[in-house]
Image (spheres, grey):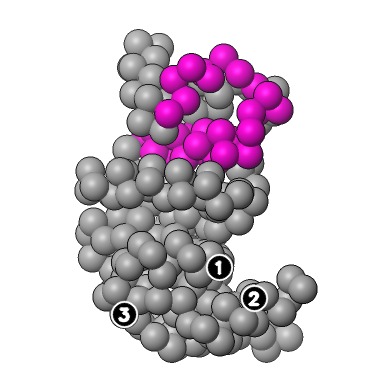
């Protein structure tokens, strides 16, 4: 269970990235987090992994009070909450296998366990044949698949995806959504921030809409608001 209880995040200059947000997300849900640029989506995800602290309010992940989690224990939260980034954040001097294995190496897992777990997740994301390739030898879609594999290899119960299809073509975007859907089916909670109206409208999952830092809509089978879609088109035209 994830719970935001009257959470406000204010940046310097009195800018409210989030304003009095209260919401609960149950275990195993697939949730789209939508809204125009600057609505607070990324801030909400960063608060969940304690990359930021709220100005007011409380955040809980299961039995953990994220606000008061001691700094030496933040790594425990981030084992539970994996993150996928729009810009991949892969190490270019390491192979696909090595990028995915890195977190397990840090945890001190045996070579045998690392080999098994990395092979399993590369199979899941369709990259079994690319394990010895370097990031610069991959397509954008393959780099994102690698990022997903890296995020889930440790077995997190929650996966945050911040605009994971933002740099991808439509066909590849759907392939990434298929992978996220399969991960969700095995019980992982997925929270995906996105501007992709087509995906949101066709996938028909729970949709939480932010606007100017406020939670303005929360629908079980939501759609991307036409107004926000038009705003997005205007900013790119």
For label 3, the SS is: strand
For label 2, the SS is: helix
Number of numbered callouts drawn = 3
Q: Which residues are magenta?
A: 126-154
For label 1, the SS is: loop
Q: Nearer the viewer, residue 161 or 230?
A: 230
Inspect the magenta stretch and tell me whether residue 140 lies in it.
Answer: yes
Residues under labels 1 and 2: Cα distance? Answer: 8 Å
Residues under labels 1 and 3: Cα distance? Answer: 17 Å
Find disc 3 in the rendering and name its residue: 219
Mark 1 burial class by Cα count in 10 Å: few <14, some 14-19, many 20+ = many
x then y, percent, for residue 149: 44, 34
x then y, percent, for residue 61: 31, 62
Residue 11 as seen in the image, left or right of residue 163: right
Residue that appears at 64% across and 33% down: 139
Find disc 2 in the rendering and name its residue: 232
Q: Is residue 39 visible?
A: no
Q: Quadrant of residue 133?
A: top right
């Amino acid at each position: 269970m994830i719970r935001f209880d009257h959470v406000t995040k204010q940046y310097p200059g009195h800018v409210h990235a989030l304003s009095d947000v209260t919401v609960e997300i149950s275990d195993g849900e697939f949730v789209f987090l939508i809204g125009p640029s600057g609505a607070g989506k990324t801030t909400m995800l960063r608060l969940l992994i304690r990359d930021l602290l709220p100005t007011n309010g409380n955040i809980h992940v299961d039995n953990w009070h994220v606000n008061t989690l001691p700094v030496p224990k933040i790594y425990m939260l981030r084992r539970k909450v994996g993150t996928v980034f729009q810009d991949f954040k892969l190490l270019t001097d390491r192979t696909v296998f090595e990028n995915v294995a890195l977190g397990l190496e840090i945890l001190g897992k045996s070579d045998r366990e690392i080999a098994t777990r990395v092979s399993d997740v590369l199979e899941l994301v369709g990259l079994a044949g690319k394990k010895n390739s370097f990031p610069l030898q991959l397509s954008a879609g393959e780099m994102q698949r690698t990022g997903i594999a890296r995020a889930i290899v440790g077995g997190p119960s929650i996966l945050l995806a911040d605009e994971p299809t933002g740099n991808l073509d439509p066909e590849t975007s759907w392939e990434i959504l298929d992978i996220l859907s399969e991960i969700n089916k095995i019980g992982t909670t997925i929270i995906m921030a996105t501007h992709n109206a087509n995906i949101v409208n066709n996938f028909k999952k729970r949709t939480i809409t932010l606007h100017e830092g406020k939670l303005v809509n929360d629908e079980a089978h939501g759609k991307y608001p036409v107004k926000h879609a038009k705003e997005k088109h205007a900013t790119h035209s």
